[in-house]
Amino acid sequence: MFRRLLLAASLACLFAAGAQAQTIDDILKKGKLVVGIDVTNPPYGNMGKTMEPEGLDVDVAKAMAKRLGVALEIVQVTGPSRIPTLLNNRADVMIATFAPTPERALQVSFSSVYSDVQQVILAPESRAIKKVADTAGLKIGVVRGNTQDVAFTPMAPPGCTILRFDDDAGVMQALLSGQVDGIVTGSVTSAVISKQNPDKKLEIKLAIRDNPLTIGVRRGQQDLLNWINTFIFYMKYSGELEALHKKYDIPYALPVL
């Protein structure tokens, strides 16, 4: 009985230690910042010609690690895997076009906004879509469980078929191959897809939702979240964040505060 009680107490202590919120000191001691990034969503994240991650989110992660004075490790994620990756302690923070919602905030905490895009419907020029109701009878692609899915699904008209894919790359390929008639994606990503595929003659039909982007951490990590918010404020105040947006031709209209 004593041995059982001792084992139970030991397990309880281990659980309590594992449940402690990660702090800045923990990251400094580890000497490494592990960041989850979606590399299927240019220009925020994609694999470059040298097969190394690049994009706005990558540069923000690099700036964060530099400010901390630690090495950077990137963990590749998709939209649906962002929260599980955080909750399973496979990443310290998530910088992956992560928009805050009340439902997501039940599981993770969000920083202040570091970028902003609109969710839009992208389709060929020949496809007549002037309002959401015009998607009736069409196939529209979204990332499963992502903000595109959350935004569009409730407003989709009867007769609209929503096809869900695991990541942005899958959604883009579905549009380019003609598997879907249109997709819901970010306005910046839409511009990239259209520019890279001029023969497809794609255009943004309409915006359906504003999509502020934030950095995610596990709930209870207030020390880390405070530092991240200070970091974002400094990046805005110094002009570094605006410069990164210009580097990737992403519209920048964020206030300093």
Image (cartoon, grey):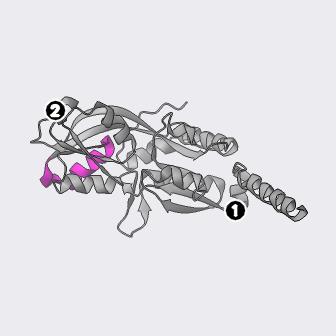
Q: Residue at x 23, y 54 (%)?
A: 174
Residue type indicated by callout 2:
Asp
Query: Farthest residue in the bottom direction?
Result: 50
Query: Farthest residue in the left direction?
Result: 126
Instruction: Indicate the quadrant containing the N terminus: top left, top right, bottom left or bottom right.
Output: bottom right
Query: Farthest residue in the right direction?
Result: 2
The answer to which of 247 and 216 lies nearer the viewer is 216
Q: Position of residue 85 (x, y in %)?
A: 53, 55
Q: Position of residue 81 (x, y in %)?
A: 46, 54
Against 18, residue 127 (above or below) is above
Q: What's the distance in space between the residues labelled 1 and 2, CA to CA?
A: 53 Å
Q: Residues within 10 Å of mark 2 (few under 14, many from 20)?
A: some
Q: Position of residue 218 (x, y in %)?
A: 61, 46
Q: Residue at x 16, y 34 (%)?
A: 129
- Residue denoted by label 2: 134
32 lies left or right of 157: right
The answer to which of 130 and 6 lies nearer the viewer is 6
108 lies left or right of 176: right
Residue type indicated by callout 1:
Lys
Instruction: Indicate the quadrant containing the C terminus: top left, top right, bottom left or bottom right.
Output: top right
- Residue denoted by label 1: 30
Disc 1 on helix, strand or loop? helix
Q: Residue at x 35, y 35 (%)?
A: 151
The range drawn in magenta is: 184-201
Secondary structure mainly formed by the magenta segment: helix
Q: Residue at x 30, y 32 (%)?
A: 208
The answer to which of 187 and 149 lies nearer the viewer is 149
Against 233, residue 51 (above or below) is below
The answer to which of 165 and 256 lies nearer the viewer is 165
Does residue 23 appear anywhere in the picture? yes
Does residue 131 appear anywhere in the picture? no
